[in-house]
Image: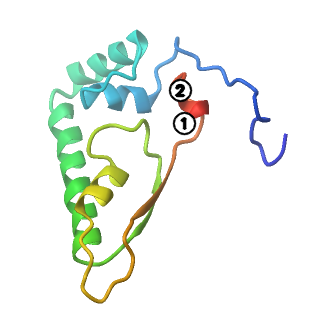
Amino acid sequence: MMGGLEPEGASVSVDTSVPHIARVYDYWLGGKDNFAVDRAAAEEVMETFPDILVSVRAQRAFLGRAVHYLVAEAGIRQFLDIGTGLPSGNNTHEVAQRRRRRPASCTWTTTRSCSCTPGPCSPAAPRA
């Protein structure tokens, strides 16, 4: 094991008996990559803070506007997205790829994103 990474071919277990914020957030965004324990935790938060769905969706809309501006207007083409959770609709790399518009003086044609979430949060996480 080098640098704290799992050796190639090693499996990483996902504890589906404990909620994970990435999967809870996925549930709030209408995703499918969550488990019963995540949905129960999400619903418990929603009972305490009924506007959580409005807040989560407003945050995702802001992310879309901010990335759109950075790509289309400011010419940013590389993003490091830390604590991203599970990939869901309108995430950083999707917005960046969809919104890219090259200024006339620019020679690049793609945007690049690196997304990082600590620890496995879904069975597919080790293979992603």
Is 37 situated above or below 103? above
Is 101 situated above or below 54? below
Q: Residue at x 54, y 36 (%)?
A: 128
- Neighbor class of circle 1 (other Cα within 10 Å; few <14, some 14-19, many 20+) is few
Q: Residue at x 26, y 45 (%)?
A: 90
The residue at which mark 2 appears reads as 124
Q: Residue at x 32, y 50 (%)?
A: 94
Q: CA distance from mark 1 to mark 2?
A: 6 Å
Residue type at mark 2 is Ala
The residue at which mark 1 appears reads as 128
Q: Position of residue 97 (x, y in %)?
A: 32, 58
Q: Nearer the viewer, residue 90 or 103?
A: 103
Is 91 situated above or below 45? below
Which element is circle 2 on?
A: loop
Residue type at mark 1 is Ala
Quadrant of res 74? bottom left
Position of residue 31 in the picture relative to residue 85 (left or right): left
Q: Position of residue 29 (x, y in %)?
A: 25, 32
Are the residues flagged by discs 1 and 2 in contact, CB closer than 8 Å?
yes
Q: Position of residue 7 (x, y in %)?
A: 80, 35
